[in-house]
Image (spheres, helix red, strand yellow):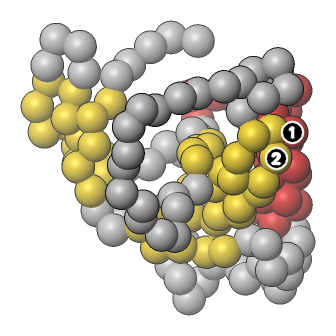
Amino acid sequence: MKQLLAVVVLLLAGGPVLATEEPRYEVVKQYEAFELRRYAPQLRADTEVTGEFEAAGNQAFRILAAFIFGANRKQETITMTAPVDMRPAEASEKIAMTAPVTMVPKDGGAQRGTYVFSFVMPAGYTRATLPQPTDPRVIIREVPARLMAARRYSG
């Protein structure tokens, strides 16, 4: 994960970090530990990768970085935005919970699984104007407006 973080920092270091576009939102309500935000609809470039957490993140980042650096039908560079999102892929089938629940680390505690890694596309693009990826592992997804809790932190 350190390598992935270093790549993200280097990409954002090309210009002032404060100038990096972030998803639009409005604060609905502030609480002591977090704030409730309403995020605008957005386009995301997603890729799904299976493996140990760090290796999957590195592979996914390379796939999506290639897309925004010109591996698309228009061979157009797309501005990097923040944040970059990585989450476990949702299971396609729901299975009823049973007891007891056990957890055993595999390979020294490495978290192997399937993860979805996403880059939010700059707000100026629409589905029609966004260059289409040439790599079939990159999927463009429309995310509707949504309400989310957010906690601020530095670093």
**x then y, percent, for residue 18:** 56, 28
Going by the numbered disc 1, the residue's amino acid type is Ala
Q: Is residue 131 left or right of residue 65?
A: left
- 155 with respect to 53 (left or right): left
Q: Nearer the viewer, residue 99 or 38?
A: 99
Q: Seen in the image, is 97 located left or right of residue 70?
A: left
Q: Nearer the viewer, mark 1 or mark 2?
A: 2
Dividing the picture into quadrants, the one containing residue 86 is top right
Q: Position of residue 23 (x, y in %)?
A: 44, 48
Type of residue at label 2? Gly
The residue closer to the viewer here, 42 or 92, is 92
For label 1, the residue is: 55
Contact between labelled residues 2 and 1, with CB atoms less than 8 Å apart:
yes
Task: Give the crowd class for mark 2: few <14, some 14-19, many >=20 residues within 10 Å.
Answer: some
The quarter of the picture where residue 29 lies is top left
| In the rendered image, the vertical position of residue 34 relative to residue 45, given as above or below | above
Q: Residue at x 58, y 47 (%)?
A: 88
Callout 1: helix, strand or loop? helix
Q: Up-down: is 98 above or below 100? A: below
At horizontal 78% and vertical 29% (from top left) the residue drawn is: 106
How far across and down, in percent of the image, does residue 108 sit? 82, 19
**Quadrant of image for the C terminus:** top right
Q: What is the number of the mark on residue 67?
A: none
Give the residue drawn at x 58%, y 27%.
103
Element type where label 2 sits in the image: strand
Residue 82: give x, y in percent of width and height. Answer: 58, 41
Viewer-closest of 147 and 14: 147
Residue 69 appears in view = no
* Mark identifier at residue 51: 2
